[in-house]
Image: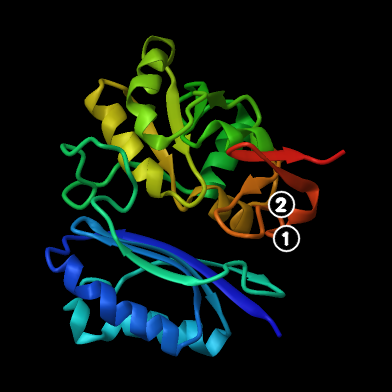
Amino acid sequence: MQIINIAGYKFVGMPDAADLIEPVQIRCTDLDLKGNVLISPEGINFSVAGLRSNIEDFLTYLRNDPLFAGRLTDLPVKESQSDMKPFGRMVVRLTKEIITMRQPMICPESRRAPSVEPAQLKQWLDDGHDDQGRKIVLIDARNSYEVEMGTFEGAVDLRIERFSEFPDAVKTQHEDTHDKTVVSFCTGGIRCEKAVLLMEDLGFKNVFQLEGGILRYFEEVGGEHWNGDCFVFDERVALDPSLKEKSQNYAPRGGGFQKLS
């Protein structure tokens, strides 16, 4: 039985977020889905797994049900497959932010950070510079234990333990990147929606987010310029560049994981 795993997010005003929790929970339960859905006044963020027909029904519900008043009609998702549902239960939660940064002036709904497509980034990395001849600096916006599993060759590791530490940590890179093109990346793109806006506010020039994050890079480009695996927030633990589960290669260690020899 093939299980479809989808992940998606959208920054969109949801002042009625609290009223959405119960009906979304009921719909997910009725569809026998497992995973997590976060709903906040700034939008929605979800990772869920189930049979393909049920996943398609869930997406139709989000995109077309009057409950969402047309706010999710253009909701993009990323997909992978597994033999089992990589979540133990279905949780729908109300949160203050769909990704916690604690920088209320950063509002991706009102302005979106510049982005670079995976194929374009690969070309820049192949060439060693962007189209204007500027050197490329990659900044990993993920937590340190995620970076330890894998990252782009030569990427800056900010050694943060949670995304709320990113604003202070990234300030240290400002002087070293003023004449370069900076690309920030994360697993699926949601963290960099905020990260790159913040970097622009801090005075970074020529800064981009990797469109769709690492997982879309894997899907469209493969593993070139990447070392290791990519941590994912479910029981699969990590995916390789072919989007295959790698949980067998890792064991829990403290708040993260260690690679088995």
Residue at 19% from the left image edge and 67% from the top image edge? 18
Q: From the image, which quarter does the C terminus lie in?
A: top right
Q: Quadrant of residue 199?
A: top left
Q: Which residue is nearer to you in this view: 8 or 97?
A: 97
The disc at residue 240 is 2
Q: Amino acid at mark 1?
A: Lys
Left or right: residue 218 versus residue 75 is right
Left or right: residue 130 versus residue 179 is right
Badge 2 density bin: few <14, some 14–19, many ≥20, Cα 10 Å: some
Q: Is residue 201 positioned above or below 43 on the image?
A: above
Residue at 47% from the left image edge and 48% from the top image edge? 117
Q: Distance from label 1 to label 2 (Cα)?
A: 5 Å
Q: How is the image coloured?
A: rainbow
Q: Which residue is nearer to you in this view: 222 or 255?
A: 255
Residue at 62% from the left image edge and 24% from the top image edge? 154
Q: From the image, which quarter does the N terminus lie in?
A: bottom right
Say whether marks 1 and 2 touch (CB < 8 Å). Answer: yes
Image spot of residue 124 (x, y percent) = 56, 34
Image spot of residue 79 (x, y percent) = 55, 68
Badge 1 density bin: few <14, some 14–19, many ≥20, Cα 10 Å: some
The residue under label 1 is 244
Q: Amino acid at mark 2?
A: Asp
